[in-house]
Amino acid sequence: MRVTIECCGASARWCGADAITLDLAAGATGNDALDALAERYPDFSARRDSVAIASGDAITSPTAPLFDGDVIALIPPVSAG
Amino acid sequence: MSAIKSLPRLRDGALNLADWLVEAQPADAGALAVFAGTVRNEHLGNAVSGMTYHAHRGLAEARLREIEAAAEARFKVHVLVAHAVGVLAIGEVSVIVVIRGGHRAEAFEACRWTIDTIKQAVPIWKEEHYVDGAVRFLEGVPIKPVESL
Protein backbone atom coordinates (compact mmCIF):
# COMPACT_ATOMS: atom_id res chain seq x y z
CA MET A 1 0.00 0.00 0.00
CA ARG A 2 1.03 3.60 -0.52
CA VAL A 3 0.88 6.38 2.10
CA THR A 4 1.85 10.03 1.95
CA ILE A 5 3.94 11.56 4.72
CA GLU A 6 3.72 15.33 5.23
CA CYS A 7 6.90 16.63 6.87
CA CYS A 8 6.11 19.49 9.25
CA GLY A 9 8.61 21.94 10.73
CA ALA A 10 12.18 20.75 10.97
CA SER A 11 11.25 17.26 9.75
CA ALA A 12 11.12 18.68 6.23
CA ARG A 13 14.82 19.51 6.58
CA TRP A 14 15.65 16.12 8.10
CA CYS A 15 13.94 14.31 5.22
CA GLY A 16 14.80 16.82 2.50
CA ALA A 17 11.19 17.22 1.33
CA ASP A 18 7.86 18.65 2.39
CA ALA A 19 6.09 15.40 1.50
CA ILE A 20 7.20 11.82 0.89
CA THR A 21 5.42 8.81 -0.57
CA LEU A 22 6.12 5.46 1.07
CA ASP A 23 5.23 1.98 -0.12
CA LEU A 24 4.53 -0.18 2.92
CA ALA A 25 3.31 -3.72 3.48
CA ALA A 26 -0.37 -4.25 4.14
CA GLY A 27 -1.08 -3.93 7.86
CA ALA A 28 1.78 -1.51 8.45
CA THR A 29 1.45 0.99 11.29
CA GLY A 30 2.69 4.51 11.92
CA ASN A 31 5.72 3.01 13.63
CA ASP A 32 6.52 1.08 10.46
CA ALA A 33 6.36 4.32 8.49
CA LEU A 34 8.71 6.00 10.97
CA ASP A 35 11.09 3.04 10.74
CA ALA A 36 11.10 3.28 6.96
CA LEU A 37 11.90 7.00 7.12
CA ALA A 38 14.65 6.38 9.66
CA GLU A 39 16.27 3.85 7.34
CA ARG A 40 16.14 6.26 4.44
CA TYR A 41 17.07 9.55 6.15
CA PRO A 42 19.92 9.60 8.71
CA ASP A 43 18.99 13.05 10.03
CA PHE A 44 15.48 11.79 10.73
CA SER A 45 16.79 8.59 12.31
CA ALA A 46 18.54 10.51 15.07
CA ARG A 47 15.26 12.20 16.04
CA ARG A 48 12.74 9.46 15.30
CA ASP A 49 11.68 8.90 18.90
CA SER A 50 10.81 12.57 19.45
CA VAL A 51 8.36 12.69 16.52
CA ALA A 52 4.59 12.26 16.82
CA ILE A 53 2.15 11.43 14.03
CA ALA A 54 -0.96 13.39 13.10
CA SER A 55 -3.85 12.14 11.00
CA GLY A 56 -6.26 14.84 9.97
CA ASP A 57 -6.45 17.36 12.80
CA ALA A 58 -5.51 14.98 15.61
CA ILE A 59 -2.48 13.19 17.00
CA THR A 60 -2.76 9.47 16.31
CA SER A 61 -1.16 6.47 17.96
CA PRO A 62 1.96 5.20 16.18
CA THR A 63 0.59 1.69 16.65
CA ALA A 64 -2.57 2.45 14.69
CA PRO A 65 -2.76 0.66 11.33
CA LEU A 66 -2.36 2.61 8.13
CA PHE A 67 -4.37 2.09 4.97
CA ASP A 68 -3.69 2.59 1.29
CA GLY A 69 -4.03 6.27 0.40
CA ASP A 70 -3.62 7.55 3.95
CA VAL A 71 -1.98 10.91 4.53
CA ILE A 72 -0.20 11.39 7.85
CA ALA A 73 1.97 14.21 9.15
CA LEU A 74 5.23 14.15 11.07
CA ILE A 75 5.03 16.35 14.18
CA PRO A 76 8.58 17.05 15.41
CA PRO A 77 9.20 18.70 18.81
CA VAL A 78 7.20 21.93 18.95
CA SER A 79 8.39 25.47 19.70
CA ALA A 80 5.33 27.71 19.68
CA GLY A 81 5.31 31.08 21.40
CA MET B 1 -20.60 34.37 20.33
CA SER B 2 -18.71 37.67 19.96
CA ALA B 3 -17.15 38.58 16.61
CA ILE B 4 -13.61 38.09 17.88
CA LYS B 5 -14.46 34.61 19.20
CA SER B 6 -15.49 33.53 15.70
CA LEU B 7 -12.09 34.36 14.18
CA PRO B 8 -9.47 31.68 13.50
CA ARG B 9 -6.91 31.59 16.30
CA LEU B 10 -4.08 30.90 13.85
CA ARG B 11 -3.39 34.05 11.86
CA ASP B 12 -1.18 34.82 8.88
CA GLY B 13 1.38 37.48 9.74
CA ALA B 14 2.09 39.45 12.89
CA LEU B 15 -0.71 39.92 15.42
CA ASN B 16 -2.10 43.32 16.36
CA LEU B 17 -2.61 43.31 20.12
CA ALA B 18 -5.42 45.89 19.96
CA ASP B 19 -7.47 43.59 17.71
CA TRP B 20 -7.62 40.98 20.47
CA LEU B 21 -8.62 43.42 23.24
CA VAL B 22 -11.81 44.82 21.71
CA GLU B 23 -14.20 42.64 23.69
CA ALA B 24 -16.00 44.37 26.54
CA GLN B 25 -14.88 43.35 29.99
CA PRO B 26 -17.52 41.04 31.55
CA ALA B 27 -19.41 42.74 34.37
CA ASP B 28 -18.30 40.07 36.86
CA ALA B 29 -14.59 40.43 35.94
CA GLY B 30 -12.25 42.56 38.01
CA ALA B 31 -9.04 41.53 36.27
CA LEU B 32 -7.63 41.63 32.74
CA ALA B 33 -4.30 39.84 32.24
CA VAL B 34 -2.52 39.92 28.87
CA PHE B 35 0.58 38.14 27.63
CA ALA B 36 2.09 38.90 24.24
CA GLY B 37 5.15 37.10 22.88
CA THR B 38 7.34 39.07 20.49
CA VAL B 39 10.27 38.27 18.22
CA ARG B 40 13.56 38.97 20.01
CA ASN B 41 16.75 40.09 18.26
CA GLU B 42 19.02 37.61 20.01
CA HIS B 43 19.08 33.89 20.79
CA LEU B 44 21.90 32.17 22.66
CA GLY B 45 24.31 34.89 21.65
CA ASN B 46 23.34 34.89 17.97
CA ALA B 47 21.98 38.07 16.39
CA VAL B 48 18.49 37.34 15.02
CA SER B 49 16.96 39.26 12.11
CA GLY B 50 13.52 37.66 12.05
CA MET B 51 11.45 34.53 12.53
CA THR B 52 9.31 32.27 10.38
CA TYR B 53 6.53 30.45 12.21
CA HIS B 54 5.44 27.15 10.63
CA ALA B 55 2.37 25.18 11.72
CA HIS B 56 0.27 22.12 11.12
CA ARG B 57 -2.69 24.38 10.54
CA GLY B 58 -5.60 22.09 11.27
CA LEU B 59 -4.17 20.59 14.42
CA ALA B 60 -2.79 23.94 15.65
CA GLU B 61 -6.18 25.62 15.30
CA ALA B 62 -7.87 22.74 17.12
CA ARG B 63 -5.29 22.75 19.90
CA LEU B 64 -5.50 26.53 20.45
CA ARG B 65 -9.27 26.27 20.88
CA GLU B 66 -8.88 23.23 23.13
CA ILE B 67 -6.47 25.18 25.34
CA GLU B 68 -8.93 28.07 25.60
CA ALA B 69 -11.69 25.73 26.72
CA ALA B 70 -9.41 23.89 29.16
CA ALA B 71 -8.19 27.13 30.75
CA GLU B 72 -11.74 28.46 31.08
CA ALA B 73 -12.86 25.24 32.80
CA ARG B 74 -9.82 25.04 35.06
CA PHE B 75 -9.57 28.66 36.21
CA LYS B 76 -13.18 29.89 35.74
CA VAL B 77 -12.06 32.82 33.57
CA HIS B 78 -12.66 34.04 30.00
CA VAL B 79 -9.79 33.13 27.65
CA LEU B 80 -8.82 34.24 24.16
CA VAL B 81 -5.62 33.14 22.39
CA ALA B 82 -4.08 33.76 18.99
CA HIS B 83 -0.84 32.68 17.31
CA ALA B 84 0.87 33.96 14.18
CA VAL B 85 2.23 31.94 11.27
CA GLY B 86 4.52 33.21 8.54
CA VAL B 87 7.44 35.64 8.53
CA LEU B 88 7.70 38.11 11.43
CA ALA B 89 10.17 40.92 12.03
CA ILE B 90 11.93 41.80 15.27
CA GLY B 91 9.46 43.21 17.80
CA GLU B 92 6.36 41.90 16.08
CA VAL B 93 3.80 39.96 18.12
CA SER B 94 3.69 36.20 17.57
CA VAL B 95 1.33 35.02 20.30
CA ILE B 96 -1.35 36.61 22.48
CA VAL B 97 -3.16 35.37 25.59
CA VAL B 98 -6.03 37.45 26.98
CA ILE B 99 -7.59 36.49 30.32
CA ARG B 100 -10.59 38.17 31.89
CA GLY B 101 -11.49 36.95 35.36
CA GLY B 102 -12.93 37.82 38.72
CA HIS B 103 -9.64 38.51 40.49
CA ARG B 104 -5.97 38.96 39.65
CA ALA B 105 -4.82 35.69 41.21
CA GLU B 106 -6.74 33.42 38.85
CA ALA B 107 -6.15 35.77 35.92
CA PHE B 108 -2.35 35.63 36.35
CA GLU B 109 -2.42 31.88 36.99
CA ALA B 110 -4.57 31.21 33.95
CA CYS B 111 -2.37 33.43 31.77
CA ARG B 112 0.79 31.57 32.83
CA TRP B 113 -0.78 28.14 32.37
CA THR B 114 -2.19 29.05 28.97
CA ILE B 115 1.06 30.30 27.42
CA ASP B 116 3.04 27.44 28.96
CA THR B 117 0.53 24.96 27.51
CA ILE B 118 0.59 26.59 24.07
CA LYS B 119 4.36 26.10 24.03
CA GLN B 120 4.07 22.37 24.72
CA ALA B 121 0.86 21.32 23.00
CA VAL B 122 0.48 23.30 19.77
CA PRO B 123 2.21 22.13 16.55
CA ILE B 124 3.98 25.35 15.67
CA TRP B 125 7.70 25.65 14.90
CA LYS B 126 10.06 28.63 15.02
CA GLU B 127 12.62 28.99 12.26
CA GLU B 128 15.09 31.70 13.18
CA HIS B 129 16.78 33.92 10.63
CA TYR B 130 20.17 35.22 11.72
CA VAL B 131 21.94 38.42 10.78
CA ASP B 132 24.76 36.39 9.20
CA GLY B 133 22.27 34.81 6.78
CA ALA B 134 21.92 31.43 8.50
CA VAL B 135 18.48 29.93 9.11
CA ARG B 136 17.71 27.31 11.74
CA PHE B 137 14.72 25.62 13.38
CA LEU B 138 14.76 25.95 17.15
CA GLU B 139 14.90 22.83 19.25
CA GLY B 140 11.50 22.16 20.77
CA VAL B 141 9.75 19.74 23.08
CA PRO B 142 7.84 16.59 22.05
CA ILE B 143 4.20 17.56 21.65
CA LYS B 144 1.98 16.78 24.65
CA PRO B 145 -1.79 16.37 24.95
CA VAL B 146 -3.52 19.37 26.53
CA GLU B 147 -5.12 17.19 29.20
CA SER B 148 -1.68 16.13 30.44
CA LEU B 149 -0.65 19.68 31.31
Image: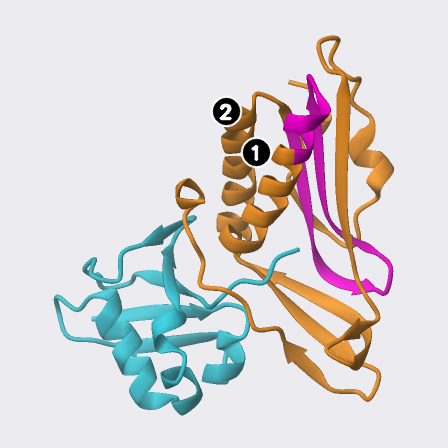
Residue at position x 45%, y 58% in the image: B143
Q: Which residue is mark 1?
A: B68
- Chain represented in orange: B
Q: Is residue B31 above or below residue A81?
A: above
Question: Is residue B105 or residue A32 the one in the foreground?
Answer: B105
Residue at position x 84%, y 70% in the image: B41
Furthest toward the top, the residue is B27
SS at badge 2: helix
State which chain disc 2 sits on.
Answer: B
Residue at position x 54%, y 67% in the image: B140
Label ID, residue B73 = 2
Q: Magenta stretch containing residue B102, yes or no?
A: yes
Q: Is residue B100 above or below residue B7?
A: above
Quarter of the image with the N terminus of chain B is top right
Disc 2 crowd, CA 10 A, few/some/many (<14, 14-19, 20+): few
SS at badge 1: helix
The tint chain A carries is cyan
B42 left or right of A34 in image: right
Distance in Å between CA atoms under marks 1 and 2: 9 Å
Q: Position of residue B142 (x, y in %)?
A: 44, 63
